[in-house]
């Protein structure tokens, strides 16, 4: 797929029909900061009405105590998924206290000068809960706490065994179905990495940041106003060097060509000490742990990437152990900024487009991704992040440089059969409408979320003013919406999660020192 003209050659395979896509399942993980009315990050504990963030199946926290994470179930349609995500936002809105707001942008709101004001998520006294907090303490030591306040949205997607089984039969493959699925899911991963500039340009919504986020950091941004910085043609600063990037992981050689290769690369990184992290120490002088370990990755979740092959873990399994045992179960698309104009952080158009893109990636030719191409893709990512809306910006291909907008247009035009088939599956017009919206953004950069955010930020007087205005609008709207009979369901979930955490804490038999020894 690295060839510049691949989009012209794309055709739907003969074996594929609309019925085979009905078994697709999708879910969303959406992060967002709680903020005080004055715009600063909230320092209050996780709201009691939301239950236990350790054991609640849908409402937890990411890095910070104030960084909420809302998780939907895997569901049969985009409408069901967005409906449940909306329910979770209503639950959160009803539980917020002291006039707190739910910040709707990926880059954080006002941060104090000291990292200590960014409180780590506290998961209680169980060994598993303490490990989660220790992991976050280690992240803060390694990279600083500010980077960990960035919020994003992960889109999880799977295809059914009937889909893969029909495909396998059409290709005449006689290996186990799981091996066939693994190969195809990894093909999707490689192509998504190749097409990442599409996501950054079309959905990126973080062209500017508050000055407070840059405290103590070198950067290449320009002043936007007294308290903000930006780049004129930026799309998603979250996905660039100011976001979830670090030099240590740049040297990791984690490949996506075979599942065993990917698993081995992850496990090697988790098992290999890094002298810079060793120098930080893993315990204080009195023996209190400060990191899980001094390895390149404390745990596998520390590996940052725009997409991950995933399998649901069981018991104490690590993600790579689950993949090795049962193969790839779904794909986690991690490149989406929050949509600040949506009450729930994502629109129907973006949701449908991500499914079109994923299926396009899955069905397209996907040669192995080797280091020289990987280096080229990293350059393309930075160009799309920093200069994506510049009409003259180019990206690198094996046959030379091509104008980003021409490249985007070629792929979007090639996706029309995919959108049409998905609409046939679900009896809708939402996928073709989403593709039309994205083509409009391709041809008119001022229609992109990043351009709109930049314009509205300037109009409002700054990032904080713009973000607070939207947060207040969303809060007002969500307060007027009712959960109806589902309110009792979520109340029961919260109560059960508290009970589940208490059970975990009561059943621990190992000391925490012995518990973390397996990770050291």
Image (spheres, rainbow, N blue to C red):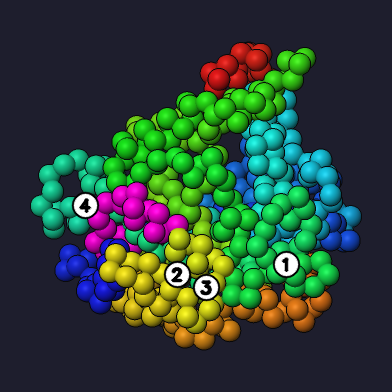
On the image, the x and y values in percent for residue 192 come to 39, 59
Magenta residues (range): 361-378
Task: Please provide percent x and percent y for residue 289.
Answer: 69, 22
Question: Which quarter of the image is occupied by the N terminus?
Answer: bottom left
Distance, label 4 to label 1, CA atoms, is 51 Å
Work out whether mark 1 precedes mark 3 in sequence or the reverse, and give the earlier one: 1
Disc 4 marks which residue?
165
Residue at (77, 53) in percent of width and height:
215
**Residue at left offset 43%, top offset 79%:** 405
User: Within 10 Å of the Cα at label 1, are there few (<14), some (14-19), or many (20+) other Cα atoms?
Assistant: many
Q: CA distance from mark 1 to mark 3?
A: 17 Å
Residue underneath mark 2? 198
- Circles 4 and 2: CB atoms closer than 8 Å: no
Query: What residue is at 58 percent from the left and 16 percent from the top?
Result: 517
- The picture quadrant where one finds residue 264 is top left
State the residue position of label 1.
Answer: 229
54 vs 373, nearest the viewer: 373
Say left or right for 387 vs 116. Answer: left
Secondary structure, mark 1, is strand
> Which residue is rendered at x = 29% and y = 64% of the image?
398
Q: Earlier in the sequence, mark 4 or mark 2?
A: 4
Q: Nearer the viewer, mark 3 or mark 2?
A: 3
Q: Are marks 2 and 1 in contact (CB under 8 Å)?
A: no
Dot 2 falls on a residue whose secondary structure is helix
């Amino acid at each position: 797929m690295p060839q510049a003209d691949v989009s012209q050659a794309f055709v739907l395979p003969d074996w594929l029909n609309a019925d085979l896509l009905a078994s697709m399942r999708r879910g969303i993980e959406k992060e967002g900061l709680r903020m005080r009315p004055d715009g600063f990050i909230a320092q209050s504990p996780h709201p009691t009405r939301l239950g236990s963030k350790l054991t609640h199946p849908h409402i937890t926290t990411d890095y910070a105590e104030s960084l909420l994470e809302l998780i939907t179930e895997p569901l049969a349609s985009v409408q069901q998924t967005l409906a449940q995500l909306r329910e979770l936002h209503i639950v959160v809105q009803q539980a917020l206290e002291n006039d707190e707001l739910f910040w709707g942008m990926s880059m954080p709101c006002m941060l104090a000068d000291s990292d200590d004001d960014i409180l780590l998520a506290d998961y209680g006294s169980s060994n598993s809960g303490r490990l989660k907090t220790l992991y976050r303490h280690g992240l803060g030591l390694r990279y600083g706490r500010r980077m960990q306040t960035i919020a994003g949205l992960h889109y999880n997607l799977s295809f059914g065994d009937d889909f893969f089984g029909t495909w396998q039969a059409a290709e005449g493959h006689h290996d186990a179905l799981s091996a066939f699925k693994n190969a195809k899911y990894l093909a999707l991963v490689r192509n998504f990495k190749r097409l990442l500039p599409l996501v950054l340009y079309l959905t990126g919504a973080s062209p500017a940041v508050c000055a407070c986020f840059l405290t103590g950091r070198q950067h290449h941004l320009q002043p936007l106003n007294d308290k903000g910085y930006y780049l004129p043609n930026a799309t998603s600063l979250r996905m660039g060097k100011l976001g979830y990037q670090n030099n240590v992981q740049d040297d990791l050689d984690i490949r996506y060509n075979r599942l065993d290769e990917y698993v081995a690369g992850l496990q090697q990184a988790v098992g290999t000490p890094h002298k810079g992290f060793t120098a930080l120490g893993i315990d204080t002088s009195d023996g209190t742990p400060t990191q899980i370990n001094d390895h390149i990755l404390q745990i596998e979740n520390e590996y940052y990437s725009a997409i991950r092959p995933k399998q649901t873990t069981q018991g104490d399994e690590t993600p790579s152990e689950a993949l090795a045992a049962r193969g790839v179960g779904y794909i986690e698309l991690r490149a989406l900024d929050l949509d600040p104009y949506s009450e729930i952080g994502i629109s129907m158009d973006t949701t449908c487009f991500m499914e079109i893109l994923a299926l396009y990636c899955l069905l397209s030719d996907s040669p192995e991704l080797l280091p020289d191409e990987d280096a080229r893709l990293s350059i393309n990512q930075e160009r799309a992040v920093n200069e994506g809306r510049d009409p003259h910006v180019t990206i690198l291909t094996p046959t030379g440089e091509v104008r980003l907008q021409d490249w985007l247009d070629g792929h979007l035009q090639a996706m029309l059969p995919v959108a049409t088939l998905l609409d046939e599956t679900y009896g809708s017009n939402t996928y073709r409408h989403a593709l039309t919206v994205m083509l409009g953004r391709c041809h008119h950069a001022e229609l992109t979320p990043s351009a709109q955010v930049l314009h509205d930020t300037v109009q409002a007087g700054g990032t904080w003013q713009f973000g607070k205005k939207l947060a207040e609008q969303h809060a007002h709207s969500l307060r007027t919406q009712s959960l109806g009979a589902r309110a009792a369901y979520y109340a029961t979930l919260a109560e059960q999660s508290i009970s589940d955490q208490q059970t975990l804490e009561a059943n621990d038999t190992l000391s925490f020192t012995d518990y973390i020894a397996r990770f050291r």
